[in-house]
Amino acid sequence: KTLGLLTSDLALHAPSQIASAVKSRATQSGVNVIISMPEVQDTRGCTAALQDLLAQRVDGLLVNVPLDDEQAEALSALAGPVPVLFLDVSETAAVNSLIFDADQGARLGAAHLLEQGHQRIALLGGPQSSVSARARMSGWLAALAESGLSPCGCEYGDWSAASGYEKGHLLLAADTPPQAILVANDQMALGVIRVCAERGLTVPGQISVVGYDDTADSAWYSPPLTTIRQAFKIAGERSVEWLLARLAGDDIGIGQTRLPVTLVERASTS
Ligand code: IPT
């Protein structure tokens, strides 16, 4: 059997760790994986990539590209009888999905900073085109609002460390800099930590930084990063297992599986 994986840019750490887990789990079951990575992740790019995988006669499809509900539903319909599982959609999309709980993750990060007594908290979100980035941002805003707070600064990056560096400078340029920053992924947090060092702000002494993902390198940052762990290996394995069960004839219809996330407390917050 052959599975198709339609994925976000594999130069990013999170999608590459998911792809790695998918590939290992599939190999264990003697299943082949064909990877397709659209240059532009718009409706046209994803449709073309999906058609290309279908033309290669894949038996099942995993889609780890951020998609709005209508886009995901359209791709699911396009696949016809070939089962498709989406990994980066909202739970309101009427498709099969296996997704991490973004609201829980955002709230865990915010609650951690609030418990430490921080009140001036800045937000560095992911790209507004990404459904998961938007969900993290609204979780943060809701958690702060419930404590009667609003963010003391808000920027959006593109998930890269370079954008974390660029937007981090904007957030820290304020007259009264934030006491803490919630960052939508670990790669951007890497850039933020660099900005802090360049401005002579100690982490966590003068500013706390929380990331999101817990990719394999995050424990090796300086200081080791406090972050929200998304268990990418489990997500990759479970998604292959779901497809294999479907292909074996198990009737697993439209279903949304939500995976919990956890706070990993390291040394970048205090
Ligand atoms: C999401 C990551 O959290 C983020 O760092 C970035 O790599 C993004 O993917 C790329 O699309 S994880 C996704 C399964 C929501």
Image (spheres, rainbow, N blue to C red):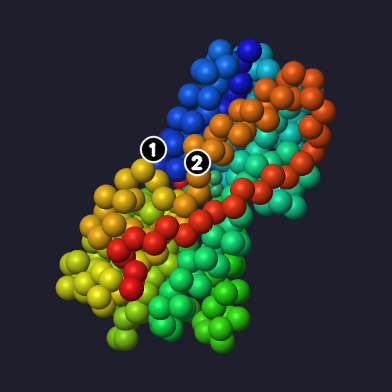
Nearer to the camera, 52 or 240: 240
Question: Mark 2 — residue?
Answer: 232
- The spot of residue 257 in percent (x, y) is 69, 44
Residue at image coords 25%, 65%: 195
Neighbor class of circle 1 (other Cα within 10 Å; few <14, some 14-19, many 20+) is few
Q: Give the number of marks.
A: 2
Q: Is residue 208 left or right of residue 113?
A: left
The answer to which quarter of the image holds residue 96 is: top right
**Helix, strand or loop at disc 1?**
loop
Question: Mark 1 — residue?
Answer: 11
Mark 2 residue's CB less than 8 Å from ligand 1: yes
- The spot of residue 204 in percent (x, y) is 28, 71
Residue at image coords 67%, 23%: 244
Residue 72, compared with residue 103, is above or below; it is: above
Neighbor class of circle 2 (other Cα within 10 Å; few <14, some 14-19, many 20+) is many
Residue at image coords 60%, 62%: 103
Q: Is residue 149 left or right of residue 91?
A: left
Tag shown at residue 97: none
Tag 1 near tag 2, CB within 8 Å = no
Quadrant in which the C terminus is drawn: bottom left
Instruction: Give, as a three-letter code, the residue at label 1.
Output: Ala
Distance between the alpha carbons at the discs numbered 1 and 2: 15 Å
Instruction: Give, as a three-letter code, the residue at label 2.
Output: Phe
The answer to which quarter of the image holds residue 54 is: top right
